[in-house]
Image: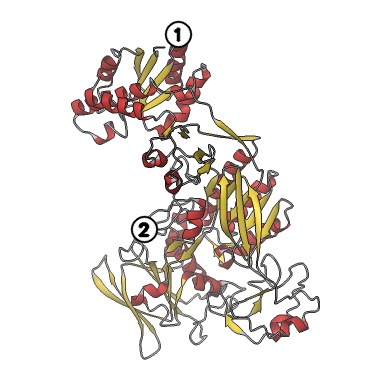
Amino acid sequence: MKERIGVFICHCGRNIAGTVDVEKVAEVISKHPQVVHCETYVYMCSEPGQKLIMDAIRNKGLTAVVVAACSTTIHYETFARVVEADGLNRYKLEIANIREQCSWIHINRKEATEKAIRIVLASIAKVSMDEPLYPIKAKVTRKCLVIGGGIAGITAALDIANSGIPVVLVEKSPTIGGKMAMLSETFPTLDCAQCILTPKMAEVARHPNVKILTCSEVISVEGYVGNFKVKILKHPRKVDPSKCRLCTLCERVCPVTVPREFDRGLSTRKAIYIPFPQAVPSAYVVDEEHCTKCGLCVKVCPTKAINLDEKEEIIEEEVGAIIVATGYDLYPGEKLREYGYGVYKDVIDSLQFERLLSSGGPTKGQILRPSDKKPVKRIVFIQCAGSRDDNHLKYCSKICCMYTAKHALLFKERVHDGEVTIFYIDIRAAGKGYEEFIKRVQEEFEVNYIRGKVSKVYRDKNGDMVVIGVDTLSGQKVTVRADLVVLALGIIPQLDRDLASMIKIPVDEYGFAQEVHPKLRPVECVTSGVFVCGAVQGPKDISETVTQASAAAAKVIELLTQEYITHEPTIAEVDKDLCSGCRICIAVCPYGAIEIVEGKAKINEVLCEGCGACVVACPSSAIKLRNYTDSQLINMVKAALTGV
């Protein structure tokens, strides 16, 4: 049966019409033998534009539709719903991208118009051979895995659990809380970080729909959206949280002393320890690396909670969706040799300074020099330490300007006669109340901001830290003496490459998780059912992190509250008569969607994402993509090249 195709060409304001002669395109396309209707409109995606399409389908008996407009990514779903509303199969719709692929990249109007015509003709060639398809359905496991127990993971877990969906929260350290637990106050409101975080930690710990697995890591992920099979390696804690009463007897008798990670090495702990007072689970843990197994802790424990022979175990879970919220780490300060980090004790990083500010920190909130425990009167902050640097991190770490200003304010509040100098490149304070916060620090607290880069930090013979830099506004060399130097180190992702590969999360050049689309799908990954939130996706502050965590949770709730999940049917299919069972397709499939059954390749329809790798690799031409067949592509190329 001959197709009755309708073509609708969008002006997109002047985005398209400013470069492409839209009316000329319509004039040429309307002469195509399969096109029974062709018209243009200023904004085809608007309600009046959508109504034009619906009316034409109804009145002209259209069997296929081409919309010449912007990228498929932006408005395919919009137009698919329009054609479905009038009974047309959504897979009989094609989007001819004449904006991003034509008008936006051309200057010459005649050339752009000619190219637009060819793009539309290619889309007509394809849609004329498109088959009606129907979404693939699969049952859903109503449970979510959240990887990472920081504020992002906690927020996402609570949002999902509160909707009635069970959550497995996996954290590799002995406690949830993440980096936020280490902070003193948070900008710009200066709320106590612990006061905000610890109630959330307690809430998620006692929530009936949340299962927390600390000292654990994901080691295997198989399956597909709605039906993931996950293996989790639980390392031995060697202390039973249900029996531990925090009596401290074990800690007192332990003979081993090592640097405390929670205080960034500014204090020490024993081999059996509690990470911090508000830790969840609220129990001691044995550091297996440093424990000598002397048994003294076992002897003094009144509840018999300690078992030094406890072994690791593998826990298997079936979940319908996965959220990755593994957070961030600081760029290693040791790589910035000119700043003396790791050489001089009085050159510290921003998280170490947070611990000095904290009333629960190693100095109980007093600002003391790590080298000799003397009070700090003069302090220098160095911003962009590693960030915006071609030799280290090329990107901006986004939060450093704000937390440095916060540090300066908190220091001046405690040391009224203190001297604060901040070396900066630019001040970036793009958030609600952020610019006002910076102004307050500069004016009310008389903090000395110097626009310039630091070239060297060293200790002189008097014991002072000497900071040498250049004031780029005056062009003068600057030398500042200080008791303490604080580096605003850049943020790097704490996403294990093996984990990313396992869950099939693409990463960008810096190691951050790559979302599908930064504006339209900022928490979704290319692997259906996998979502990201927080600093694993890019540098961000707490408010942004919490917002994104709730967004990821909303996506999971939307997915897991359905009885069935649907999957795009534009996937690969195998012609068993041609398949030789050579297994080449299995090797190239990035989604693990192909297996050999009775000597022939078989596609898991829910796992397949229609990437086409197997089609290209198959030596027998036994695999094709639905609605992207070889004959369709050949006809598209012919139409684009010949203009017919």
Q: Closest to the observer: 268 or 403?
A: 268
Say which of marks 2 and 1 sits in front: 1
Callout 2 amino acid: Tyr
Q: Position of residue 130 (x, y in %)?
A: 42, 23
Between discs 2 and 1, the one toward the N terminus: 1
**Residue 395 tag number:** 2
Q: Is residue 14 above or below residue 499?
A: above
Where is residue 283? Give x, y as percent. 71, 70
Q: Nearer the viewer, residue 360 or 46?
A: 46
Q: Secondary structure at mark 2?
A: loop
Disc 1 marks a residue whose amino acid type is Asn
Q: Is residue 506 above or below residue 241?
A: above
Q: Residues within 10 Å of mark 2 (few under 14, many from 20)?
A: some
Q: Nearer the viewer, residue 298 or 486?
A: 298
Colour scheme in the image?
A: secondary structure
Which residue in the structure is indicated by mark 1?
A: 59
Judged from the image, the secondary structure of the residue bearing numbered disc 1 is: helix
